[in-house]
Amino acid sequence: MNERQRARRPGGRSARVGAEVHRAVTELINERGYGNFTVGEVAARAGVADSSIYRRWGGLETLLADVALTRLNAQSPMPDTGSLDGDLRTYAANVAREITGPDGLLLVRLAVALSSNGQQGLQARDDLRDERTRQLQSMLDRARERGEHAPDALDVLDHILAPMYIRVLFGIGPLTPDYIDGLVDRLL
Amino acid sequence: MNERQRARRPGGRSARVGAEVHRAVTELINERGYGNFTVGEVAARAGVADSSIYRRWGGLETLLADVALTRLNAQSPMPDTGSLDGDLRTYAANVAREITGPDGLLLVRLAVALSSNGQQGLQARDDLRDERTRQLQSMLDRARERGEHAPDALDVLDHILAPMYIRVLFGIGPLTPDYIDGLVDRLL
């Protein structure tokens, strides 16, 4: 076991530091919003050294993206129901539930914050997007392997996710089950 | 002519104040971003009294929405080409050009800022959305009056505007003419 593996052992010090830092970030986002706190403030609240954060995440942008991704993966994991139809409907319903919840615009807010934060911000935004796209792509690949005719990941983004996000952002609601199913029907 | 009409006479003092206040808001947005300046700072920069701003706009949220709407109306007026097909393609291309420009995410940033700013913010966001929707609806109504089969305004939002906004927000680009025409084809 090398140094890095030891440091990341589940339940070890690294896991505890990770959890504390994530908690501190979530609190600061809720209290002040994106863009209104520093790595130093996260470190102080989490009870760790600034250098621990820089060493592990490189900077605030990557840390923010990591926190968002962890949360998304926990709250909206990619479904695996055995059929494309079932997967897409479950996924769309999960996303709708997530984005109409109290921190629903988390991902949009984060993307806006990262987009106006120089090259590191753009890189963190791109990495986050690519990771979620890979997960969606795996779901679509499983459908193709079963012999189903699956849409492209970008079509799912354009015609299922984008309309729901924009409706929530501009307060056009609610996202009813009929509406969500209609988006899936239209794509399939 | 009553007091209110006199005050809004084009070229009069009210128009000058309006232009100065809009200019001050645009500068402050560019320098600091939404949410990081007050009515007092706008007033100081525009060389007017705080009370002039409160009297005319009611508060910062309504002022921000007014500035955004004025800009959108100037840069992306609703086209009137004589056919639904022409109108939708021109409109989509205009929006694409606007949102891929330097302040492209203006409307998304503003919606995010207003959404986290209490009841006044939500009201300003809703008014802005309703005004742009009315303009889009007029374009679609003209098509219906010519006997064309026009989609609903919300379908245009869901399947033409939303995908373009989300692609720009997450850095998935570019919005090529083929891509934009494809969105319109799919909807029509």
Image (cartoon, coloured by chain):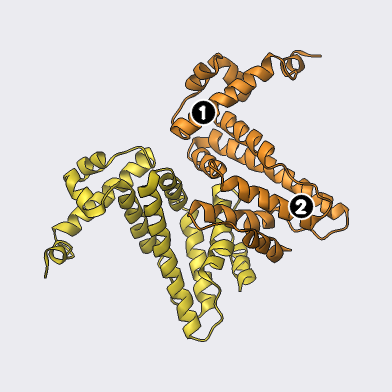
Chain colours: A orange, B yellow
Residue A100: % across, % down: 56, 48
Report the Cα–Cα distance between label 2 and label 1. 33 Å
Front-most of residues A158 and A180: A180
Image quadrant assignment for residue A135: top right
Which secondary structure, mark 1?
helix
**Relative to residue B78, is residue A100 drawn left or right?**
right
Give the residue at the far bottom of this rendering.
Answer: B147
The disc labelled 1 sits on which kind of residue? Glu
SS category of the residue bearing label 2: helix
| Amino acid at dot 2 | Asp
**Subunit of mark 1?**
A
The residue drawn where x is 54% and y is 83% is B148
Q: From the viewer's perspective, is residue B134 above or below residue A172? A: below
Direction from residue A151 to residue B61 in the image, left or right? left
Q: Which residue corresponds to mark 1?
A: A27
**Label located before the other in sequence (2 or 1):** 1
Mark 2: few/some/many CA within 10 Å (<14, 14-19, 20+): some
Q: Quadrant of the N terminus of chain B?
A: bottom left
Residue B59 tag number: none
Residue B17, given in percent of the width and then of the height, sits at 19, 53
Say if A159 sits above or below B170 in the image.
below
Residue B11 coordinates in the image, percent (x, y): 16, 63
Give the labeled residue for mark 2.
A87
Q: State the image coordinates of residue A87 (x, y, percent, origin top left).
A: 76, 52
In the drawing, does residue A1 fall left or right of residue A45? right
Task: Decide if residue A97 is on the left or right side of residue A87.
Answer: left
Instruction: Count residues near mark 1 (Cα–Cα under 10 Å), then give few for <14, some for 14-19, many for 20+.
Output: some
Q: How many marks?
A: 2
Residue drawn at 88 percent across, 58 percent down: A147
